[in-house]
Image: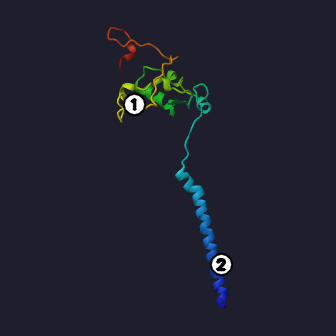
């Protein structure tokens, strides 16, 4: 290219092309990468999805919810069986697919004055009967003959 105006035109075309490709790359970065960084994927279960992870449906993938947080009961049951073998694994897995919040009541005596001097209005005591169908009575008094508390 011997003419200076033709060379200048090609330089301008190339510069515009580079600018356009750079803007396209920025848009792809914002859509593909920055969206995942700013808003990461949250695994949220609704009641039907939680119920599908019960012991009867998926024996190796059992979940239970406690105060809105979902726990993998298969890991909890296996750890509990190794550490404290009093409760059978199947009894723990029976809570799968359910909201087990009522099994863990809020200890209000630990919240008496709270951090700011008063208990949060969001802490509520429920007077509802929360009878557990898997409950069993263990007599752990010294005079009893309950051998399930013995550590071997």
Q: Determine whether the residue tagged by mark 2 lies in a helix, strand or loop.
A: helix
Disc on the earlier residue, 2 or 1: 2
In contact (CB < 8 Å): disc 2 and disc 1: no
- Mark number displayed over residue 149: none
The residue that mark 1 highlights is 119
Q: Is residue 54 left or right of residue 125?
A: right
Q: Determine whether the residue tagged by mark 1 lies in a helix, strand or loop.
A: loop
Q: Is residue 141 above or below residue 69?
A: above
The residue that mark 2 highlights is 13
The part of the image, by quadrant, that contains residue 44 is: top right
The residue nearer to you, when weighing 9 against 83, is 9
The part of the image, by quadrant, that contains residue 21 is: bottom right
Q: Is residue 46 left or right of residue 121?
A: right
The residue nearer to you, when weighing 17 against 92, is 17
Q: Residue furthest left?
A: 142
Q: Nearer the viewer, mark 2 or mark 1?
A: 1
**Picture coordinates of residue 122, whole percent (x, y):** 46, 31
State the residue at coordinates (38%, 13%). 147
**Residue count near mark 2 (Cα–Cα under 10 Å), binned few <14, some 14–19, many ≥20:** few
**Residue count near mark 1 (Cα–Cα under 10 Å), binned few <14, some 14–19, many ≥20:** some
**Picture coordinates of residue 18, whole percent (x, y):** 61, 73
Q: Is residue 64 above or below residue 128?
A: below
* Image quarter (top left, top right, bottom left or bottom right) of the C terminus: top left
**Picture coordinates of residue 26, whole percent (x, y):** 58, 63
* Image quarter (top left, top right, bottom left or bottom right) of the N terminus: bottom right
State the residue at coordinates (37%, 17%). 149
The part of the image, by quadrant, that contains residue 97 is: top right
The residue nearer to you, when weighing 116 against 51, is 116
């Amino acid at each position: 290219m011997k003419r200076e105006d033709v060379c200048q035109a090609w330089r301008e075309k190339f510069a515009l092309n580079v600018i356009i490709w750079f803007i396209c790359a920025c848009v792809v970065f914002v859509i593909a990468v920055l969206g995942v960084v700013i808003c990461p994927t949250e695994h949220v279960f609704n009641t039907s999805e939680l119920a599908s992870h019960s012991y009867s449906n998926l024996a190796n993938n059992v979940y239970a919810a406690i105060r809105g947080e979902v726990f993998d009961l298969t890991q909890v049951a296996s750890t509990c069986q190794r550490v404290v073998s009093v409760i059978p694994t199947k009894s723990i897995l029976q809570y799968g697919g359910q909201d087990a919040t009522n099994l863990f009541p809020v200890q209000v005596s630990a919240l008496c004055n709270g951090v700011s001097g008063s208990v949060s209005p969001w802490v509520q005591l429920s007077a509802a009967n929360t009878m557990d169908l898997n409950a069993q009575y263990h007599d752990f008094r010294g005079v009893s003959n309950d051998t399930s508390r013995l550590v071997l």
